[in-house]
Image (tube, rainbow, N blue to C red):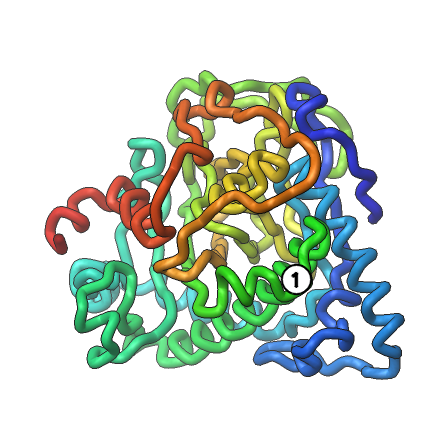
Amino acid sequence: MRCEGRDLGADRTGGVDALPVIDVAALVDDQSGADSDAGSYPGSRSRSRSRSDADSAAGAAAVAGQIDAACRDHGFFLVTGHGIDPSLQRRLDEAARAFFSQPAAAKEAVAMDRGGRAWRGWFPLGGELTSGRPDHKEGYYFGADLPADDPRVLAGRPLHGPNLFPTEPALLGPLVSEWIDAMTALAHRLMRGVALGLGLTPDWFERNLTADPTVLFRIFRYPPTTTPLPSDDGPKRTPTATTATSTTTTTTERWGVAEHTDYGLLTILAQDGSGGLQVRSGDGWIDVPPMADAFVCNIGDMLDRMTGGRYRSTPHRVLSTAADRLSFPFFFDPSWDAEVSPLPLDGEPPTDDALTRWDATSVHEYRGTYGDYLTAKVAKVFPTLFAETT
């Protein structure tokens, strides 16, 4: 679907009822750049390579235009044509469910407090906070798998270290590693589209910000619940019969994750068929129903900052339902030591939106490295663990 661009600042309260769906095959398959084998990354399906470089570049530019419009108008979009083999997600889902179905004592063997400053491993239901509220979920944290003798690990750098993989199911560790590799390659391709949409060279981010990206991967399980949800003082809209409908809060729902934004550049989310994700749109919320063989993408605080608000890091949340839900968010972020500065973009971006954010903060005021920003954020998510490991 083609997303027609409009001035983001001129329509901040009206909202939309559906998120754009973008076929990114032309961007993934683009042969015009130096990375000519990008379509054959781990976990991807084989593709035909018959198009000329000129055709590839034109196709990639067209997709970049759609991504640009989506980032301006929504901050969220769905991608198809990404080339990731659906069987990889299915096998990962099966292994994750097998892990979470184990007794707590078995999962404690890979608990986060065993991972030190790497902050890797499993946490129990309610063990993670969002905006000060315990999330109604359990989860498993992973990242780039670094050996204990890596200089960054020896230096005690937060969020760097080996992954804690379980003994059972034995397949989970290899599947997680394959998924991280596939998502990292896909994220590089999508960021080429972002660069093109912003009028930059396709490899701008890789040359300046993501040559050694900070990559984080989570698996979250939201158990079924009918527990009453705390009072929702957020905006609501009247439900409409659209692909992604507005939702009002009922007393039978509970937060899986409270309202928040993501921290870095780009999030790529795979989810099962349960639903529950909601995105803020104008003065309301819209549901993001699962779509077969599609990933949900959204931009984070750093891309919001870099574009001066031209692209927004859009608040979102998760409602728990009667289903036992799994989600697989992958976060593609700047290099740890990168100074995240505003881009030299043409035109006047929208004004800062600190007054409209639930936390009344502005990402545009931050000065420092991405690593410092991320560490401060994670410290609020796991305050006890942070205190124990610093």
In the image, 45 versus 32, the foreground residue is: 32
How many marks the image carries: the answer is: 1
Q: From the viewer's side, name the closer residue of 9 and 343.
A: 343
Taking the spot 30% from the left edge, 37% from the top edge, the residue there is 134
Q: Nearer the viewer, residue 170 or 192?
A: 192
The answer to whether residue 50 shows anywhere in this view is yes
Q: Which residue is mark 1?
A: 192
Q: Residue at x 43, y 30 (%)?
A: 362
Tell me if 306 is positioned left or right of 230 in this view. Answer: right
Coordinates of residue 319 in the picture (x, y in percent):
49, 36
Answer above or below: position of 232 versus 315: above
Point 72% across, 60% down: residue: 80
211 lies above or below 359: below
The residue nearer to you, when weighing 105 against 112, is: 112
Q: Quadrant of residue 33 in the image? A: bottom right
Relative to 358, 162 lies left or right: left
Q: Amino acid at mark 1?
A: Arg
Q: Is residue 191 above or below residue 377?
A: below
Q: Secondary structure at mark 1?
A: helix
Residue 49 position, x and y percent, is 82, 83
Q: Residue 267 placed where, x, y %?
A: 53, 53
